[in-house]
Amino acid sequence: MTLSEFIRDLKGDPAFMENVTCWRELPPRDARYAPFPDGLDARITSALNSRGITQLYSHQRKALDYACAGRDFVVVTPTASGKTLCYNLPVLREILKDDAARALYLFPTKALSSDQTSELYQLIEAMKCEIKAYTYDGDTPASARTAIRQAGHVVVTNPDMLHQGILPHHTKWVKLFENLKYVVVDEIHAYRGVFGSNLANVIRRLRRICAFYGANPTFICCSATIENPKELAESMVGKEMALLDDNGAPAGRKHVVFYNPPVVNRQLGIRAGSLPATRDIAARLVRNGIQSIVFGRSRLAVEVLLRYSKDLVRDALGNSARVRGYRGGYLPTLRREIERELRAGHVDMVVSTNALELGIDIGQLDACVMCGYPGTIASTWQQAGRAGRRNSEALMILVASSNPLDQYIISHSEYFFGQPPERAYINPDNLYILLNHLKCAAYELPFVEGETFGGVEDTEELLNYLASQDILRLVSGKWYWMAEEFPQAGINLRSASDQNFLIIDITDPKKHKVVGEMDRFTVPMLLHKYAIYMHEGRQYQVEDLDFDDKKAYIREVDVGYYTDADLTTSLKVLDEFEDAPVGAMTKHRGEVMVSSIVTLFKKIRFDTHENLGWGPVTLPELEMHTSACWWTLPEGMDEKYGKDEMKTAMVALSYLLRHIAPMHLMCAPTDISVVYHVKDPFSDRATLYLYDHIPGGIGLSDRVYEMNHELFKEALRMLSACPCQNGCPSCTGANAQGGKRALISILKELTDDKALG
C-alpha cells in the first residue's frame, strides 16, 4: 500500500477520526536555486554534477559567500534541507586552495560524526583529490591517531573528545591549530542546558589555544529551527554571528495529525493509555508496509513498544529483524548496524528515543509516530522531519498522553502551529561549570595577568581563588597549574554524574558479554535487583547490581511483565541568595540539597498494564547539590481551604508546573523537578520548590525566579480550559483528582493583579 492510500484509509475510518483533534496538511514547497559562484574549483562542481547537483539551494550559496568573506554565521533550516553542503563546500574550497589549511568539525554524537564523515568522504572520492578527512573519537584505533594529528585536513570529532583528548594535548596538534581555518559546530540546538553550558566553555578554551598558535578560525554553526539561534550561537562561540535562515530547499506535502486516545472513564476523566494507542497505529503501519519511525519518550516506553511491534512481524522461526529499536545505552556496534540497515531499506520500522532526532541519515521513511509530546515544538518538528526526508509525501501522528502539557497541545493546535519554536537556554558563566573549565584552561596554557577567560570579568578573582586552594601558582605574572590530577578527567560534559554502569549478560555461563550501559542517576530506577531490563524487545532480569564496581548482571527471561520503580525525594535549603514579594507570595532563590532513594518497584503486565505486585529495593541514597527557586504561600490558607483540600490542590499545582515549565525553558521535563512541602522546615510555611535536576544547577530555576508568577497564570489557564468537573489525569494528575476547584481559587488569589500593585 502506498502512503497516499494509507492516508485515505485513515481519513475514511470513523473509529480513528473521532479521536483526531487536528489534521493539518502542509503544502509542498518549491526549491529556490542559485548558481555556483565563479571561480569555484572545477573538481567540486564536477563531483556535485555527478550526484545530480547542478546548482545550489539559495541558502547554500549564501553560506558559501559568507564563509568566503570570513564571516562567522549560523544556518537555521529544517531537517533534510542540505545544511551539510553549507559547511563542506567552503571547507573543501579552502583546502584545495591551500593544502596546509585545516578544519575541525564538532558533532554532538559519535553516530552523527560517523555519518557525516562518510558523506564527506564520498564527496572527496568523487572529486578524485588527496583531502584527508578522519573521525577522531574514542573508537579511533591508536595506530591511526598519529596520522590524523599530522596529516588530517578535516578532523571530525565530538565535544567530549575535544575536551579530553585534543585540547589538553595541543602540543601534539600543532599543525591543526596553526592552520585552523574553519570550526563547524553542527546541531547546536542539541547543546542546551548543562551540555551547552559546558561546550561554550570548551570553545572558549579552543579559541584561547588557537590564539596562542596565531589562528583565528571562522565558525560555522548549524541548527534546527529554534526561537533564538543567533543568540545561542553567539553565547556558544563568543563572537558575533550572522543569521542565515532563508531556506531555499524544497519540501514534500506533510500531513500532521494530532490524536487523543479516547476517554474510558468519563466520571474520573481517565483516557486510554498512549502506549496502547501508539501500538495500534504502529501495527497498522507495519501491516501495510509503510516504512516508519516511532518515537518514545523514555527507554522503557521504547522497549515496551518494540516488544509489541516485534511480536507483529515475528516469522515461524522467531525472526523479527524488520522492526528494530534504537536508544542510548545500546553499544556503538549495534547502533551502527541498525543505522546501516535503515539506510539500506531492510527495516520497516524503528522504535527510538530522541537519539534519532538528530540529523543521522536513516534513509527514506514515510511516517513518524510520536508516543507523547516530545516536550518542545522544536523537538516535535525535528522528529517529524525524520519522515519524508527526500521531499516525498510524509505523515506525522502525535499521540497524546494524559499529562497536562500533552493535553494542552493536543487541544490547542493553534498554539502549536502559531507559536515560534522555543528558546534554547545555556549559562556558560554558571560558577560550578566555569570554575571547572578554568582549571582545564590553566592546565592547557598558563594564564597571564590581565587575561580574561571568554570575556569573564572575574577571571583574575577566580584564578586567585584556585591559587589559594593550591591548584594554581602565581609566578612572575603568570598562573601555572600545580596540582597532580588531570582536571579534564573529572568533568562529564553531558552531566555531572559519575562514569556509566556496564550491563553484562550472564545468560550463557561460559560467555558473559556487555550489552549496554546506563548513567548513575538512572540505574536505581531501571537496574535494581530483580528489575526487568528490556533490550531490543527481549526481557532480562537483573540478578545483581554491583554499585562499587558499576556493573549490573542480567539474565534473559520471558515473564510477560515489565517493572517500574518509585522514587522518594527529600529536599533542604543550604543557602538563600535573594527573595522578593510576588503577588500574595514571596519568591526565593538559592542552593538546596536533594536526597533521593528508590524504595520499591511495581510489576506491570504487558497488554493489560495491570499491576501484578511489588518488591522492595535496597540501594544507597543519592545526594545532589543544586539551585532552586521556591515560593512561600501566605499564612492562613490552610484554614481558609482546609488542610486536606489545600494539600490535594498543591500536589496538583506541582504536577502542572513540572509539565508547564519545560515549555518556557526549552529543557527536557527531566531537567527540573517540583516539590511541595505542607510546612517547610526552612520557612515554617507552605512552600513550593522548583529545582534544577542537574548537579550544581545550570540556571533554569534562576530563569523561573525572573518570570515572577507567569507559570502560575499558565497553570490557571490550563485548568480553566480542561473540560473535567473537578480534576483529571490531564490537568491535576492522577494523584490529585478532586482538587481542581480549590486550586483555581488559590491560583486566582496568588496571581491577583491588584496584589502586584
Image (cartoon, rainbow, N blue to C red):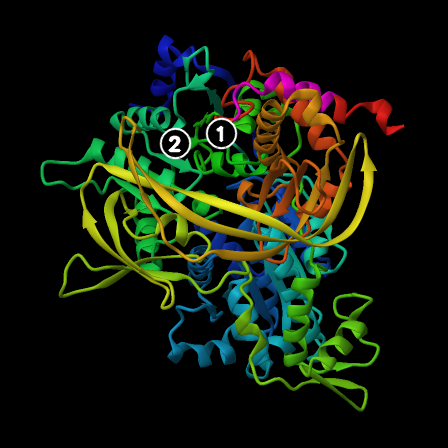
For badge 2, the amino acid type reads Asp
Figure quadrant of residue 539: top left
Circle nearer the N terminus (2, 1): 1
**Left or right of 361 in this view: 241:** right
Of the pair 645 and 725, the residue shown nearer to us: 645
> Which tag is nearer the camera, tag 2 or tag 1?
2
Quadrant of res 95: bottom right
Which residue was labeled with disc 2? 366
740 is within the stretch colored magenta: yes
Amino acid under disc 1:
Gly
Residue 448 in the image: above or below residue 135: below
Where, by quadrant of the figure, is residue 320 drawn? Answer: top left
Q: Is residue 512 above or below residue 486?
A: above
Residue placed furthest toward the right: 757
The stretch of residues the image draws in magenta is 736-748
Local packing at callout 2 (Cα closer than 10 Å; few below 14, some 14-19, many 20+) is many
- SS assignment for the magenta stretch, majority: helix
- Residue position for label 1: 252
Query: Can residue 13 be seen at all in this image of the molecule?
Result: no
At x 18%, y 46%, the residue is 557
Residue at the (65%, 86%) spot, across then down: 482
Of 670 and 155, which appears nearest the observer? 670
Q: Residues within 10 Å of mark 1 (few under 14, many from 20)?
A: some
Quadrant of the drawing holding the C terminus: top right
Q: Residue 143, percent across and down?
A: 38, 80
- The answer to whether 633 is drawn above or below residue 152 in the figure is above
- In this view, the residue farthest toward the bottom is 476
Q: CA distance from mark 2 to mark 1?
A: 11 Å
